[in-house]
Each structure stands twice: as structure tokens, then as C-alpha cells.
Amino acid sequence: MTLSDYLQLPFVQNALLVGVLVALCSSLLGVTLVLRRFSFIGDGLSHVAFGAMAVAAVIGLTNDMLLVLPVTILCAVLLLAAGTNARIKGDAAVAMISVGALAVGYLLMNLFPPSGKSNISGDVCTTLFGGTSILTLKSLEVWLSIALSAVVVVFFILFYHKIFAVTFDESFAAATGANTKLYNLLIAVIIAVVIVLAMKLVGSLLISALVVFPALSAMRLFKSFRSVSICAAVISVLCAAAGILIAAVAGTPVGSTIVVANIGVFALFTLASLVRGRI
């Protein structure tokens, strides 16, 4: 089959739509997280989502989103909204929750294997690294992804200036009367939603790539918050679309292919930055 033939398939069209939307949301919030030196939170929350997914499978929930989303949101609020007032600081808290959730989830799935699941290791590997789940999305999952992605984009556009202020100088933003705790809370909730959506795209271990690489690539050539955000969004969308199409044609894992595409773009932007610096 040629690429045009694949583009006619409904499941490839759904995967492209959801993948592009998730990549767009990840890149927009990724700029904020990278600038606040909290880029590793994506990795931590993805492991939390994996642990919650394992619990949902063990107790037999037909729709694991009912458990995964609230648990991930709660942990995001605890990690991000607590800020510097937490007894355990940011990077240590992320590491503890990340490793703990991953270990508990895998242990539960081995001790209490879900009914009808004979290949636990294969299921775990697919969840961690991504497989073809993005190509087998159900109609409900597609519409849910579209709705949640729309909420994220609208939130970023409407509160752009507040996000900018909280990102660069939270103390100054609070001094000017901005409710920084509320905006931190909203950012935490939105991040959790994006992480849960991205799990089907790249797997829980590779989610940080969607958050970090587009932002870092854009920062090689651009300096303003607006230009970095726009460039990161374009990079992320193009890499996601290219990764999904290449994976569909070549039969490679979707998540890994998208990440490799992001690595390639980062290398190109780094080279361009070095050339511009010499000139």
C-alpha cells in the first residue's frame, strides 16, 4: 500500500487527528514546564497514570479513564501547585512518585493479572513504550481527545498573558494581584489531561519527549515566549504527523518513531543555531 492508500483508512485518519492535537497541547504546555525547570513532571505523571491504569485493570474497570484521569490530576496538583512550600521539593517529589507508581503498577499486574490477559509483559511493554493503540482508537476516545484538546488550546489562548507572567516571575505576578495559586492549579490539571491523552500516542516512558523536545528545539533559534510557543507547536505537530504516517507504512512503533523525529529536528535546529552563531 502507498501512503495515499493509508491516508484513506479511517483508523489512520483518526490517529492523525488525535496525534496532532495531543502533540499540539503537549508542546504548548511544554514551553512553560521547560522554562520553570519542571520538564520532568511529564515523566512522573505518566508513571502515575500507568499505576492507575494497572489498578483499573486489576479491579476490572471497563473504562480506565474514570480512575486514571482523577488520580493523575490529583498528583499533578500536589506536584505543581504545591510549589516551593512542599516539604519534599519538586525534583525529589517527581522522582519518588514516578518510581513508586511504576513499581506498584507493575507489581499489581503481576500479582493480580486481569482476566483474559495472558501476556502481561507484552501489555506492560506496549503501555510503557507505545504500540499500535493510537491506530485502534474507538470513536468515543477520538471525540474525548478532541474535546479535551480543544479545552487545553482555548485555555492557553485565553490565559496566555497570565501563563506568561506565572512562568517567568511568579512572585511579581502575585504582587500585581494575579491569583497565582489558581493559575498553577489550572496548569496542573491541564498537564494531567495532556499526559493521559498522550499515553496512547507514545507510551508512558516517552511522554517527556513530547513535552521537552519541541520546546528545546524552538529555543535554539527563538528567544521570545510567543515565538518559542508557536515554533514548538509547529515542530510538535509536524513530528507527530510524520511519525504516525511512517509508523503506519513501515510498521514501526508509533511512539518511538515520533520521538526519533523530534530528536532529528532538535539536531537540525541545534546545527542551525551553531551556524547562525558563527555568522
Image (cartoon, helix red, strand yellow):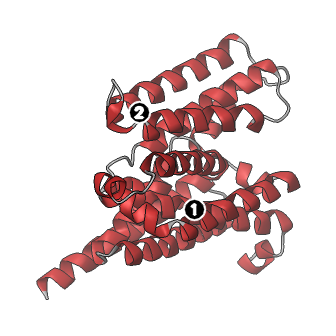
Image point 33% across, 52% down: which residue? 36
Return the residue at label 2.
94
The image position of residue 50, as x and y in percent, is 61, 32
Q: Amino acid at mark 2?
A: Val
Q: Residues within 10 Å of mark 2 (few under 14, many from 20)?
A: many
Dot 2 falls on a residue whose secondary structure is helix
Horizontal relation, residue 185 to residue 65: left or right: left
Dot 1 falls on a residue whose secondary structure is helix
Rendered position, 265 above or below 192: below
The image position of residue 224, as x and y in percent, is 32, 75
Return the residue at label 1.
25
Image point 48% across, 68% down: which residue? 160
Horizontal relation, residue 135 to residue 31: left or right: right
The image position of residue 274, as x and y in percent, is 19, 76
Residue 19 shows in the view: no
- Which badge, 1 or 2, comes first in the chain's sequence? 1
